[in-house]
Amino acid sequence: MAVELDITLLEFPKNLALVSRKVKESSPKSIVRVYHPPEVGKLIEKWCQQTGNTFRSIYPTLSEVERGKGFHGVCLNEKLSFYLTGLRLHLKEYLLRFMGKYPPYLFNFISIDCALRGMEFLEKEGFEFTILPSPKEVEGYCGFAVGFKDSKTCIKGFNTLLENKIGVEVIFKQVKGGFEIIKTAWES
């Protein structure tokens, strides 16, 4: 049975953030039926291409997204780069945890493309953050997260990217035994 989602009243990137979250919460091959304004269908289709999900247009205002396995690169060079980047980030995560310096506040992105643009934007704005793999408890697949030492800076960075139409998804904090979502893009 498909999950139904209505994003007709949300603007970009809040609409794609909610689609991204619902897809990540579903199991592979599950379908999320998305009701949206006609012009948003193309945005969802592009997001699906970037994230390794399958897009099907049913009507101009209804699409289906089937959860895939995530994006792992198209050509050999992209695949090698993807896996090497993941290896470096997971090693960095392990070392930060081992040294007790893992940042307590993080946020993730709706796609790797948005993560790269978002991190570049944050650097230009003077934010200090740590690039990490997005925790499996939050992401479901591989992805980027940015970590911060305090909640105020994390929320400011998240809001700055959201205001500049860069696809952030959720802010989460590390708690005993995992992570807790403290803010979402679509509820902002």
Image (cartoon, grey):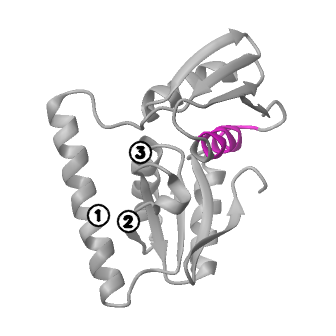
Which residue lies under the disc numbered 3? 112
Q: Is residue 20 magenta?
A: yes
- Say which label, 1 or 2, has the lower sequence index: 1
Kindly indicate whether the residue at mark 2 contacts the one at mark 1 (C-beta within 8 angstroms). yes
Identified by mark 2, the residue type is Leu
Left of 136 or right of it: where is 85? left
Instruction: State which region is magenta.
Output: 11-23
Quadrant assignment for the C terminus: bottom right
Q: Residue at x 56, y 40 (%)?
A: 27
Left or right side of 110 for 5: right
The answer to whether residue 54 is above or below residue 185 is: above
Give the percent coordinates (x, y) of residue 151. Answer: 61, 79
Residue type highlighted by circle 1: Leu
Crowd class of label 1 (few under 14; some 14 to 19; many from 20; radius 10 Å): some
Identity, as a three-letter code, of the amino acid under mark 3 = Ile
Q: Secondary structure at mark 3?
A: helix
Residue tagged 2: 132
**In this view, which residue lies farthest toward the bottom?**
100
Q: Which mark sits nearer the N-terminus, 1 or 3?
A: 1
Q: CA distance from mark 1 to mark 3?
A: 14 Å
Q: Tell which of 1 and 133 is nearer to you.
A: 1
Check disc 1 and report its element: helix, strand or loop: helix
